Image: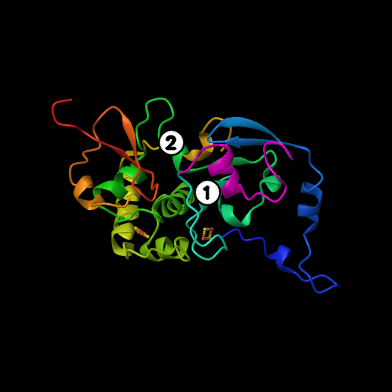
């Protein structure tokens, strides 16, 4: 994962010292972020603080709460988003380091015009590859990055790509199956548009029971949120609608 190890070097005074990249970024006054194909101009000191992480900015400033913060220390990968196509930990990345970067979050995977979920998201639903869903957005983002580069990954490659993602609900086997199936369908159909071609590029509750009725054929994508604000994007077919 994209943890900035350079930042962890120790300076002469024994304290952590910022990398040259972070020192340059700290001088910026205006940031330009491309998030899910949309351009955001943010003023440092007004819209964002220099100390804000990307995870904080996505959730608190831009309202994109699909990205989850769990450990907030780079240990669980729940906060994974794509930056210029690479999976990074948004809780370990300062927003000021993202100037002119293209960010894709879980909200950016669906078809932005129709709202239809992409093949990978639909595969997670059909495999019930989650329970509480808190880790799911991060896992999906890392899986998407894998499939963009390796359309037909082996199980070892999937496990390697998802190493570091913690799931307290132990949905790992279903996750592997979901990614495999998404890859298979993708290879078979050749109909999935890579993220790199996107414009600008880049509950709690009985969710299993809920997903049993998810068919992935409805026209509207709904954002399901439980008490933990878990945004599982799902298409629902409601009887009679
Ligand atoms: S919340 Fe970022 S790694 Fe755990
Ligand atoms: S589904 Fe992974 S933490 Fe609950």
Task: Give the class, few, some or many, for how many residues have Cα within 10 Å of label 1's Cα (few <14, many ≥20).
Answer: many
Quadrant in which the N terminus is drawn: bottom right
Q: Is residue 188 above or below residue 146?
A: above
Residue 210 locus on image (x, y percent): 21, 46
> Which residue corresponds to the image point at 53% horizontal and 66% vertical from the top-left?
75
On the picture, is 70 further left or further right than 134? right
Q: Which residue is mark 1?
A: 81
Ligand 2: image quarter:
bottom left
Mark closest to the chain's N terminus, 2 or 1: 1
Point out the stretch of residues depicted in magenta.
45-65
Q: Residues within 10 Å of mark 2 (few under 14, many from 20)?
A: few
Q: Which residue is mark 2?
A: 193
Q: Quadrant of residue 110 in the image?
A: top left
> Residue at left 65%, top 41%?
101
- Picture coordinates of residue 52 (x, y %)? 66, 49
Residue 198: x percent and y percent? 51, 33
- At 61% from the left and 35% from the top, the residue drawn is 34
Q: Is mark 1 within 8 Å of ligand 1?
A: no
For the residue pair 154 and 34, the one nearer the viewer reads as 34
Choose mark 2 or mark 1, whichever is in front.
1
Above or below residue 75? Residue 237 is: above
In this view, which residue lies farthest toward the left?
240
Residue drawn 77% across the image and 71% down it = 10
* Residue 63 sits inside the magenta stretch: yes
Q: Is residue 111 magenta?
A: no
Residue 78 appears in the figure: yes
The residue tagged with tag 1: helix, strand or loop?
strand
């Amino acid at each position: 994962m994209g943890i900035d190890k350079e930042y962890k070097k120790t300076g002469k005074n024994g304290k952590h010292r910022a990398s040259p990249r972070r020192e340059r970024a700290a001088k910026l006054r205006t940031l330009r972020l491309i998030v899910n194909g949309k351009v955001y101009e943010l003023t440092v000191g007004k819209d964002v603080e220099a100390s804000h992480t990307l995870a904080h900015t996505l959730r608190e400033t831009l309202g994109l709460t699909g990205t989850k913060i769990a450990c907030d220390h780079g240990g669980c990968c729940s906060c994974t988003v794509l930056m210029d196509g690479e999976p990074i930990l948004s809780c370990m990345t300062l927003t000021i380091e993202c100037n002119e970067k293209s960010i894709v979050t879980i909200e950016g995977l669906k078809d932005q015009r129709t709202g239809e979920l992409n093949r990978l998201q639909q595969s997670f639903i059909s495999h019930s590859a989650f329970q509480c869903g808190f880790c799911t957005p991060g896992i999906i983002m890392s899986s998407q990055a894998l499939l963009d580069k390796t359309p037909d990954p082996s199980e070892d490659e999937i496990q390697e790509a998802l190493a570091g993602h913690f799931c307290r609900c132990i949905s790992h086997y279903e996750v592997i199956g979901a990614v495999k199936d998404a890859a298979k369908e993708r290879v078979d159909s050749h109909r999935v548009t890579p993220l790199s071609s996107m414009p600008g590029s880049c509950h709690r509750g009985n969710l299993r029971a809920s997903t049993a009725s998810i068919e992935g054929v409805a026209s509207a994508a709904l954002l399901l949120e439980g008490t933990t604000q878990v945004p599982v994007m799902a298409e629902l077919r409601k009887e009679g609608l």
